[in-house]
Amino acid sequence: MYVPLAVTLATAVAGLAATLFTQYQTKKREREASYRARKVEVYTDFLRIVETLLNQTKAQLSDPNFDEKKLHLDFATVRSKAVLWASPSVLKEFSEFTKLGPGNPFAAVEVLERIQRAMREDLGLSNGGLDQGFFVHLLLNRDGSRDYASIVKKRE
């Protein structure tokens, strides 16, 4: 075999391999971007439901036309979409959330903290630098009047 022929063949194979790899990576990025958009939609819907529930507990924010049945239906829709699009860690926390009864609000906010952390992680966002209870603090204290530590101390 001629040396120039071997070099030409090796170059062609390497070029083809590089092209196929690049196409694979491009398709993978496009697919992941599509999945991310779906996840953001599901997670945003869930957070809106949580916000609606929290607003109902505050007299100045509650809606007199609040429809609890619609809220349950909305949550069922979010749960169904999450089964298709959410990561296993988010699904696990959703499952824990659905097991909670109305008698333990502290457990509910702790699960909500874990859900939000899992959602961020699933979207490729870092939770580094966010103290434990960061999301609970955002949910419970829109005015910043209490911190998570004081809430936990009251519980103990």
Image (cartoon, rainbow, N blue to C red):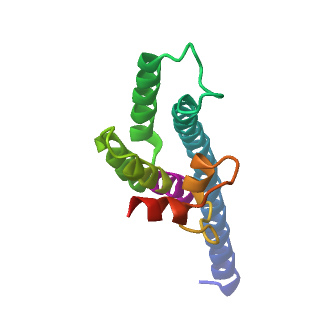
In front: 56, or 6?
Answer: 56
Q: Which residue is drawn at 66% across and 78% down?
A: 5
Q: Residue at x 54, y 60 (%)?
A: 121
Residue 58 position within the rendered picture, expressed as x and y whole percent measured from the top left = 58, 33
Q: Is residue 107 left or right of residue 25?
A: left
- Magenta region includes residue 128: no
Above or below for 144 versus 69 = below
Q: In this view, does 153 lie to the left or right of 135?
A: left
Q: Residue at x 46, y 65 (%)?
A: 153
The image quadrant where one finds the N terminus is bottom right
In front: 102, or 124?
Answer: 102
Quarter of the rendering containing residue 8: bottom right
The image quadrant where one finds the C terminus is bottom left
Above or below for 18 versus 60 = below
Residue 134 position within the rendered picture, expressed as x and y whole percent measured from the top left = 59, 60
Q: Residue at x 56, y 39 (%)?
A: 47
Is residue 123 visible in this depiction of the protein?
A: no
Numbered range of the magenta stretch: 114-123
Residue 50 position within the rendered picture, expressed as x and y whole percent measured from the top left = 52, 37
Q: Which residue occupies the extreme front position in the image?
A: 154
Residue 42 position within the rendered picture, expressed as x and y whole percent measured from the top left = 53, 37
